[in-house]
Amino acid sequence: MDYKDLQKYLEQVRFQLNVFDNFPTIRVPNGMGSGFILDYKGRSFFVTADHVVNTHDNGRRLINRARMIAIQTNVISGNSSAIIPLGGFNYFSKFILEEGTLTDETLIDAAYCELTTKNINDINTYCKTANPDISVHEEKLHIPSDSITSANLEDTYTTYGDVKGDLVPFHGTMQLRSIPKFHTGLKFVCEKNQYYELKYPKVNNEEWHGISGAPVLNQDGKLIGILCAGNSVNDILYVKTIQSVINLIDVTLCADEYAKAKAP
């Protein structure tokens, strides 16, 4: 896949997320990030980084029941764009069991929800490509589970998302502009604790803040994982392996099947 085709494919598979805390009291998004749809075992899952959709306080999870998580669409009415709310996200933490007590909570930086038929119909209707330099008004795509792979030293990796931008003049007032950013040339360093470490020439907040949750693909368009974090000191990016995410999805599918079998 040449670079232009890879850019177009990323534009088609990546979705923009907005997060609204204390909804509906406050109707202004206070968080943003990326995500993608993974088709697996005949179902469709919206996948993102956990910290995009959850509040973390000193490493402990704080579930906000008033939070709304929504996909941003291309449907514009006046100065507003339509959104598609998502629900039923699955979150995970890892604990150490010592003498019957759970200690040392570690948050797993992956979250997903199974899309409903209405979700999928709304996405198909209202979400189109919107990067004028790459692709506009084309359909968004799901990533099939047979299009995943593991990271290795030979391949080169690319990701894409909207960086938190700045204020620009807009009809006598101001408008918050997000900036689409492609990052390519990422190289595999190692795998630790179900995260890939990828090297990039320069990691800084201005170029990366807001891209969390985006898919990371190799040069053939194969998915290796979710972009989760970056370290500007050593210019390393941390990518949650897609196989570890699929393992989590399998856990919830098994739990669902068990619950159905036990239901009267």
Image (cartoon, rainbow, N blue to C red):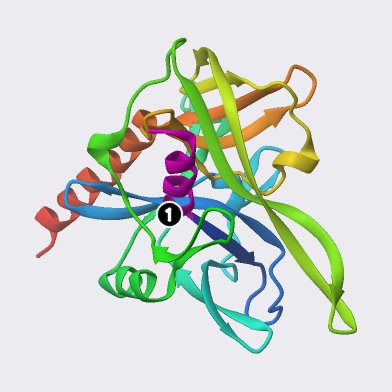
Residue 145: name its quadrant.
top left
Tell me the amino acid under the disc marked 1.
Gln
Disc 1 crowd rating (10 Å Cα; few below 14, some 14-19, many 20+) is many
Give the answer, above or below, for where 39 lies relative to 173. Answer: above
Q: Residue at x 75, y 16 (%)?
A: 234
Give the answer, above or below, for where 135 lies relative to 28. Answer: above
SS assignment for the magenta stretch, majority:
helix
Q: Which residue is mark 1?
A: 12
Q: At which x and y percent is residue 8?
A: 46, 48
Q: Residue at x 74, y 40 (%)?
A: 207
**Kind of element beneath mark 1:** helix
Query: Which is nearer the eye, 104 or 6?
Result: 6
Residue 5 on the magenta span: yes
Q: Is residue 152 left or right of residue 208?
A: left
Query: Which is nearer the eye, 252 or 130?
Result: 130
Q: Is residue 186 visible?
A: yes
- Considering every residue shown, the one lying at the far bottom of the view is 78
Q: At which x and y percent is residue 5?
A: 42, 42
Q: Is residue 29 left or right of residue 4?
A: right
Q: Quadrant of the C terminus?
A: bottom left
Q: Residue at x 46, y 46 (%)?
A: 10
In the image, the segment drawn in magenta is: 1-14
Residue 128 on the magenta span: no
Q: Is residue 62 visible?
A: no
Residue 213: name its quadrant.
top right
Q: Quadrant of the N terminus?
A: top left
Residue 87: name its quadrant.
bottom left
Q: At which x and y percent is residue 30?
A: 72, 64
> How many numbered dots are placed on residues in this image?
1
Q: Residue at x 58, y 23 (%)?
A: 186
Q: At which x and y percent is residue 247?
A: 31, 33
Give the answer, above or below, for where 188 lies relative to 162. Answer: above
